[in-house]
Image (spheres, grey):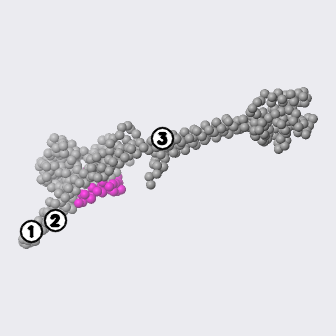
């Protein structure tokens, strides 16, 4: 159910309106309390002052002076009654004031009280004080509470009007924000629908400005770039796997079929079986390399990281390949810089260095030279393998690190095209990178590990 209240923009607008009401209430409540408290305090003080004043007039001037003072106080009032004053005798008969008769329901106890009077045909609420005066006289002084009704109503109407205005602004703002966001979301939905249908090269339209939707669009476009890159990579890898496996599997089938048809002598049969085993080994090597790459890409191998000495690992690999280099007449040298500690997988690191040295031996001509060295630069360990072979064309330096990619110059040499991609994956797992540089002649492969760990 697409309820507008469930949309975040309108929900935020209503939340803003509710917060505004709360702030308005927090402002109005103390003001209303202060108003009533001040009015009541002032009213009580005024009533007490009037009662004292009239009592003093009676004490100094007698009953005639008090009657004259009360008539003077209420004589100027016309229309709306503000003050209520009544002087009555012991029987309750009026002597002066603006109340026609003593209210029977009024309390003579000390202190301020509230009551209702009917004056000039209008029922009014009054706050009053009653006093007994010498000579049996009764004095009633009061204030018309209703005289502040208009002011209080104006305050309440203003408060309600402000609340209604805030609510209207919040709802209108929420609807406008919802409309604007939905319009932009629809554009995103249309673009993503096209991508879902298979047009991977489509991208979201880049909006103007630097708001949140623009930031989301940039992020989604980068994600789509990565997805397209991964899908293209998977497709290329699938094609490469099919191509690279077809050759050894076809050769294997041909040999087995030939053995089945020709029935060769035992010696030749054993030779063909040995060649078939070599073909199977090549297929298994490809699958093992793919499994290792999958483990590296998933980060599963990082769980087995330990402290390793990169200098020692590189030295051991040079020592391992030294007999093969001597057999080929290649000068293989190593320049270490002492212990170089880091965190990593020793088997993967050894395999990466082994791949670099093996790759250099394949392409270095007889009587050539391969130099392996380790050092620390900018807090990272560098393992460098440099040869004086033909090198790699500049436009293929990045491509050769892709899986199954083989340049034209390397087609004649054995291999699966996974060696350098495996080295690059191991470098990424160790927070490093693989950098290939042409030396003219030769190739320099810098395997960067990071960060370097201080000895301790």
Q: Nearer the viewer, mark 2 or mark 1?
A: 1
Q: CA distance from mark 3 to mark 1?
A: 82 Å
Q: Is residue 264 left or right of residue 287?
A: left
Around disc 1, counting alpha carbons within 10 Å, would you say few (fewer than 14), some (14 to 19), or many (20 or more)?
A: some
- First in sequence: mark 2 or mark 3? 3
- Residue at x 16%, y 41% (from the top left corner): 440
- Residue 304 lies within the magenta run: yes
Around disc 2, counting alpha carbons within 10 Å, would you say few (fewer than 14), some (14 to 19), or many (20 or more)?
A: few
Q: Which mark is residue 277?
A: 2
- Residue at x 36%, y 37% (from the top left corner): 208
Task: Determine the secondary structure under disc 3.
Answer: helix
Residue at mark 1: 258
Task: Name which quarter of the figure residue 218 lies in.
Answer: top left
- Residue 116 screen position, x and y as percent: 77, 41
Task: Determine the secondary structure under disc 1.
Answer: helix
Q: What range of the chain is rendered magenta?
A: 287-314
Around disc 3, counting alpha carbons within 10 Å, would you say few (fewer than 14), some (14 to 19), or many (20 or more)?
A: some
User: Is residue 120 in view?
Assistant: yes
Q: CA distance from mark 2 to mark 1?
A: 15 Å
- First in sequence: mark 3 or mark 1? 3
In the foreground, 198 or 307: 198
């Amino acid at each position: 159910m697409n309820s507008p209240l469930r949309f975040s923009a309108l929900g935020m607008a209503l939340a803003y309106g509710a917060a505004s009401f709360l702030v308005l209430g927090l402002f109005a409540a103390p003001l209303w309390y202060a108003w009533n408290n001040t009015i009541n305090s002032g009213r009580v003080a005024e009533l007490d002052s009037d009662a004292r004043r009239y009592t003093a007039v009676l004490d100094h001037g007698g009953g005639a002076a008090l009657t004259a003072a009360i008539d003077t106080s209420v004589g100027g009032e016309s229309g709306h009654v503000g003050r209520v004053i009544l002087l009555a005798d012991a029987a309750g008969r009026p002597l002066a004031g603006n109340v026609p008769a003593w209210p029977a329901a009024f309390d003579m106890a000390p202190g301020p009280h509230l009551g209702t009077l009917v004056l000039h045909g209008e029922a009014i609420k009054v706050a009053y004080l009653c006093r007994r005066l010498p000579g049996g006289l009764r004095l009633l002084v009061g204030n018309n509470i209703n005289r502040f009704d208009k002011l209080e109503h104006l305050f309440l109407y203003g408060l309600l009007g402000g609340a209604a205005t805030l609510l209207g602004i919040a709802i209108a703002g929420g609807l406008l924000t919802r409309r604007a966001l939905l319009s932009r979301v629809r554009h995103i939905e249309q673009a993503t629908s096209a991508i879902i249908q298979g047009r991977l090269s489509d991208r979201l339209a880049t909006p103007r400005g630097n708001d949140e939707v623009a930031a989301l669009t940039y992020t989604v476009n980068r994600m789509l770039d990565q997805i397209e890159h991964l899908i293209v990579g998977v497709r290329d890898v699938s094609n490469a796997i099919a191509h690279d496996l077809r050759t050894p599997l076809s050769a294997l089938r041909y040999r087995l079929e030939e053995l089945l048809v020709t029935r060769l002598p035992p010696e030749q049969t054993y030779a063909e079986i040995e060649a078939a085993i070599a073909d199977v080994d090549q297929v298994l090597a490809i699958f093992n390399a793919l499994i290792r790459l999958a483990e590296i890409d998933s980060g599963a191998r990082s769980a087995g990281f330990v402290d390793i000495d990169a200098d020692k690992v590189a030295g051991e690999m040079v020592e391992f390949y030294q007999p093969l280099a001597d057999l080929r007449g290649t000068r293989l040298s190593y320049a270490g810089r002492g212990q170089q500690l880091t965190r990593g997988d020793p088997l993967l690191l050894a395999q990466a260095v082994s791949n670099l040295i093996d790759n250099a031996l394949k392409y270095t001509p007889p009587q050539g030279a391969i130099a392996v060295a380790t050092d620390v630069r900018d807090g990272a360990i560098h393992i460098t393998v440099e040869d004086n072979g033909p090198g790699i064309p500049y436009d293929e330096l990045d491509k050769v690190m892709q899986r199954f990619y083989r340049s034209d110059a390397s087609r004649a040499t054995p291999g699966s095209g996974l060696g350098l991609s495996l080295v690059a994956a191991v470098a990424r797992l160790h927070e490093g990178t693989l950098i290939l540089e042409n030396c003219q002649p030769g190739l320099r492969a810098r395997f960067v590990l990071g960060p370097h760990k201080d000895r301790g």
